[in-house]
Image: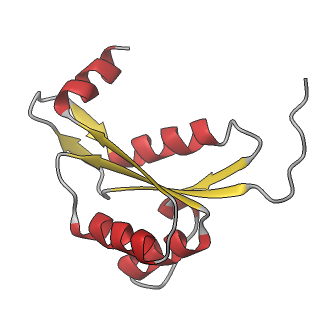
Amino acid sequence: MDNPVIDNKLKVFVSSAMGVKKKTKSSDSFDWLEIRKAVKDALNQCPYIQAFTIESHASEIPSTEYMLYNVEKSDIVVLIVKDEVRPGTHKEYIYCQEHKKPLLGYFFTEKRLKKAQRN
């Protein structure tokens, strides 16, 4: 069955900490960019969703303002958090609360990371 053509897709902003590769306690490493891309690509498999990340477009405005701009233009926000809520993530969370923006928070730990890497 072909996917339907949807003119007005749900805009889902996928956000997490920034940074490139990061060592974990288990000495394995993960890449926030790869994680955001994997989540975005998985969500975009649904014909009703248009997922995007901060990397999707270039911007000349400061990164914190740009993150909040992306939160504002989205219908739903997905926050991916590992170990700690960083200041930028906290601002996005507060913005979602103040503007009644639907938010899905995914919190993961070293244990979950190891399990996902094995699969």
Q: How is the image coloured?
A: secondary structure
Q: Residue at x 28, y 67 (%)?
A: 90
- Percent position of residue 104, x then y: 45, 50
- The single residue placed furthest to the left in the displayed view is 25
- Tag count: 0
Q: Residue at x 11, y 27 (%)?
A: 26
Q: Residue at x 44, y 69 (%)?
A: 96
- Give left or right: position of 66 versus 92: right
Image quarter (top left, top right, bottom left or bottom right) of the C terminus: top left
Up/down of 52 relative to 64, above or below: above
- The single residue placed furthest to the top in the displayed view is 119
- Give left or right: position of 29 versus 70: left
- Percent position of residue 106, x then y: 36, 43
- Give left or right: position of 56 versus 110: right
Image quarter (top left, top right, bottom left or bottom right) of the N terminus: top right
- The single residue placed furthest to the bottom in the displayed view is 61
Q: Residue 115: which quarter of the image? A: top left
Q: Residue at x 71, y 38 (%)?
A: 46
Q: Of residues 69 and 58, which is closer to you in this image? A: 69
- Give left or right: position of 88 versus 74: left
Q: Of residues 93 and 64, which is closer to you in this image? A: 93
Up/down of 24 relative to 89, above or below: above
Q: Residue 87: which quarter of the image? A: bottom left
- Percent position of residue 23, x then y: 16, 39
